[in-house]
């Protein structure tokens, strides 16, 4: 049959239309075959140009330098400086905005109590939390590209850092060493973040899928809340472990240490904070209620403790905090080989988690205001912010969702709100620290619980369950791993399952049998479209994935099994003659993939069948053409542009050659 028809619309003698035969019926069939379209190979490109295009799409998908084209050299230099320091883009034309002032003061009222609370969550001195709300926001205002992102410590990164470092060093027994490890871990976190941005490797954080993050955040929120039972119940001897079982066991075993005064205060302020949160969620214009509630709780509880001398009745307090701005800490960075592995690992985990949260939050609010946030610039900004922070007595910071939401709702116009927040914190550090002496720890615990409850996103979990059961399994594993094992291991399990799922999709790609929708030349999945019908004599298959070394064995076995099933089930009228492989959804193929197609063609020919390839994409067609140049495996008569043309041409040819 080879050589008597052609997918290019020409016969072997160069006559357009196919085979030259006599008779009116044959002429009509030849005319029908003349509508065949050529399968074109892509334009020739050098290896260097293809490599350049691939590198550009991998590392510069946003084409950040497109605005530089056609500009004078001086303008290019100005644009380059503005690209590196976004503050130079908006400060020259900035005019004072009351919205920025209100937003800055509002997020400062939230940042001060949260900074103190999250520092205690990381087992660090409370003053470190306030330091981390002063320097990093100033750095971000210079380097960051988001108008809405409010920078500071966050609960998840604080929890992870504290739990990982406590495995090696006790913050109570060796506070200075623990502090050194925290600063060093922050340095490595910033180094990882900045490197991802500079090297344009932001796609690495995409391995943390939405399902992974939803489950992880929910589990971490519960663990964070459980850790606050120490403060809420007034327990003195509490476990340092993070799992659900040891925490609850510690709570039950130390019932004698429970303080009714502490519990009463905890319930009152927790109800107040949750009520304020509910009010702000139900009436968004009252966002300031939730934003100001933590500071109001701190002020009221501090006054109550001071007036009633509650510290003498079982209510633990923060104690004396020194006034003054951030002290240099570059001399406290510890690169001792004994702890280097721990600090690098802690920095890597906290850096990736905080970076993911910061970029996600920035992009979320940018989409609401219809402006662009450069992910790689954000990585560089957050990374450099943490490197500077590690040298100025700060620990890991990023863009917090709760503070950014308040900043957004307050109507911030620029990153100036971060500067105003930082200046407010500076005033607090210089003059107001003695006011926090009598602040009870129980209120800080209540503030943390009220903040992290928002991380439990039940509607998102339900939506994941409805949309994709495999994603729900990933979400559940992340949640269970955090709850029952540890925060970092739970995250590792969820990421591992996500990667395994991706590998499964690569090694076991989707294949399906297609049928013809009656009265059309459309071919669709038989299982999806009930109107689709098998075409006698044809096995029409489609592959929906790249064909490479990882899946060629599976594809080969699966196709051979289909051929055997079709051959054994067929009658004389529907005897199988052609195997059509639709390559429309195959974006790429490697050497193993080409070898698979060649072997499949040889195998089908041995069984008296013919393999037809339909609509190979650019890269696939290019490699098929190279294989043809070497051995001529896939001639013009085995390549068609559409399945409809292939079936029409092959059916016509079969009728013409039938005895």
Image (cartoon, rainbow, N blue to C red):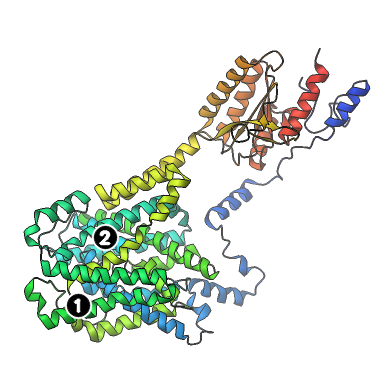
Residue 332 in which image quadrant: bottom left
Q: Position of residue 72 (x, y in %)?
A: 65, 75
Q: Is residue 275 above or below residue 351?
A: below
Residue 427 image offset from top left, x and y in percent: 29, 85
Q: Nearer the viewer, residue 75 or 130?
A: 130
Name the residue carrying label 2.
159
Q: Which quarter of the figure has residue 136?
A: bottom left
Q: Is residue 144 above or below residue 514?
A: below
Q: Quadrant of residue 575?
A: top right
Examine the rendering and report whether any part of residue 326 can be seen: no
Q: CA distance from mark 2 to mark 1?
A: 25 Å
The residue lying toward the viewer, choosing from 170 and 495, is 495
Counting labels gives 2
Q: Is residue 24 visible?
A: yes
- Find numbered disc 2 in the image and state the secondary structure of the residue it sits on: helix
Q: Disc 2, disc 1: CB below 8 Å?
A: no
Image quadrant occupied by the N terminus: top right
Residue 408: mark: none
Identity of the residue drawn at 35% across and 60% down: 455
Other-residue count near label 2 (Cα within 10 Å), few / some / many at <14 / 14–19 / ≥20 = many
Quadrant where the C terminus lies? top right
Residue 355 in the image, given as x and y percentages of width and height = 39, 61
620 above or below 369? above
Q: Which mark is residue 301?
A: 1
């Amino acid at each position: 049959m080879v050589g008597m028809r052609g997918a290019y619309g020409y016969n072997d003698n160069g006559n357009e239309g196919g085979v030259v035969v006599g008779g009116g019926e044959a002429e009509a069939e030849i005319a029908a075959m003349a509508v065949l379209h050529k399968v074109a190979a892509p334009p020739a490109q050098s290896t260097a140009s293809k490599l350049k295009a691939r590198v550009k799409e991998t590392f510069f998908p946003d084409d950040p330098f497109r605005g530089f084209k056609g500009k004078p050299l001086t303008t290019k230099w100005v644009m380059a400086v503005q690209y590196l320091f976004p503050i130079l883009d908006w400060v020259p034309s900035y005019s004072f905005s009351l919205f920025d002032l209100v937003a800055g003061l509002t997020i400062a009222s939230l940042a001060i109590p949260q900074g103190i609370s999250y520092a205690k969550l990381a087992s660090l001195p409370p003053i470190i939390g306030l330091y981390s709300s002063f320097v990093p926001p100033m750095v971000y205002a210079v380097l960051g590209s988001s108008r809405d992102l409010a920078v500071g410590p966050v609960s998840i990164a604080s929890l992870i850092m504290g739990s990982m470092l406590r495995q090696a060093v006790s913050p109570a027994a060796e506070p200075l060493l623990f502090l050194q490890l925290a600063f060093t871990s922050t340095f490595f976190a910033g180094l990882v973040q900045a490197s991802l941005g500079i090297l344009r490797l932001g796609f690495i954080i995409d391995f943390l899928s939405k399902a992974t993050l939803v489950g992880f955040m929910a589990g971490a929120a519960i663990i964070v809340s459980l850790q606050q039972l120490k403060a809420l119940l007034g327990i003195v001897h509490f476990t340092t472990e993070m799992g659900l079982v040891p925490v609850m066991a510690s709570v039950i075993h130390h019932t004698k240490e429970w303080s009714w005064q502490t519990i009463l205060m905890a319930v009152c302020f927790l109800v107040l904070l949750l009520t304020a949160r509910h009010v702000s969620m139900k009436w968004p214009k009252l966002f300031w209620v939730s934003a100001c509630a933590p500071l109001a709780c701190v002020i009221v509880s501090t006054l109550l403790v001071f007036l009633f001398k509650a510290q003498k009745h079982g209510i633990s307090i923060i104690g004396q905090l020194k006034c003054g701005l951030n002290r240099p800490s570059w001399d406290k960075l510890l690169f001792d080989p004994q702890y280097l592995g721990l600090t690098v690992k802690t920095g890597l985990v906290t850096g990736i988690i905080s970076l993911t949260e910061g970029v996600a939050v920035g992009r979320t609010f940018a989409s609401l205001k219809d402006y662009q946030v450069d992910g790689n610039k954000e990585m560089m900004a957050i990374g450099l912010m943490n490197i500077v922070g590690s040298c100025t007595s700060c620990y890991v910071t990023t863009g917090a969702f709760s503070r950014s939401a308040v900043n957004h709702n307050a109507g911030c116009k620029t990153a100036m709100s971060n500067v105003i927040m930082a200046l407010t914190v500076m005033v607090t550090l210089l003059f107001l620290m003695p006011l926090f002496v009598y602040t009870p720890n129980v209120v800080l615990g209540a503030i943390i619980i009220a903040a992290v409850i928002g991380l439990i996103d039940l509607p998102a979990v339900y939506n994941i369950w409805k949309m994709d059961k495999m994603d729900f399994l990933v979400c559940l594993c992340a949640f269970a791993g955090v709850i029952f094992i540890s925060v970092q291991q739970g995250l590792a399990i969820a990421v591992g399952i996500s990667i395994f799922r991706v590998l499964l999709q690569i090694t076991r790609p989707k294949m399906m049998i297609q049928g013809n929708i009656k009265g059309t030349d459309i071919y669709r999945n038989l299982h999806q479209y009930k109107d689709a019908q098998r075409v006698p004599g044809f096995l029409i298959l489609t592959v929906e994935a790249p064909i490479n070394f990882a899946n060629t064995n599976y594809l080969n076995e699966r196709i051979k099994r289909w051929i055997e099933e079709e051959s054994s089930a067929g009658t004389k009228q529907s005897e199988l003659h052609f195997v059509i492989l639709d390559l429309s959804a195959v974006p790429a193929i490697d050497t193993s993939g080409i070898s698979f197609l060649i072997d499949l063609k040889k195998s089908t020919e041995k069984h008296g069948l013919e393999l037809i390839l339909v609509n190979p994409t650019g890269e696939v067609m290019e490699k098929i053409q190279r294989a043809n140049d070497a051995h001529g495996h896939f001639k013009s008569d085995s390549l068609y542009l559409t399945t409809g043309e292939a079936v029409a041409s092959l059916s016509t040819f079969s009728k013409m050659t039938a005895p």
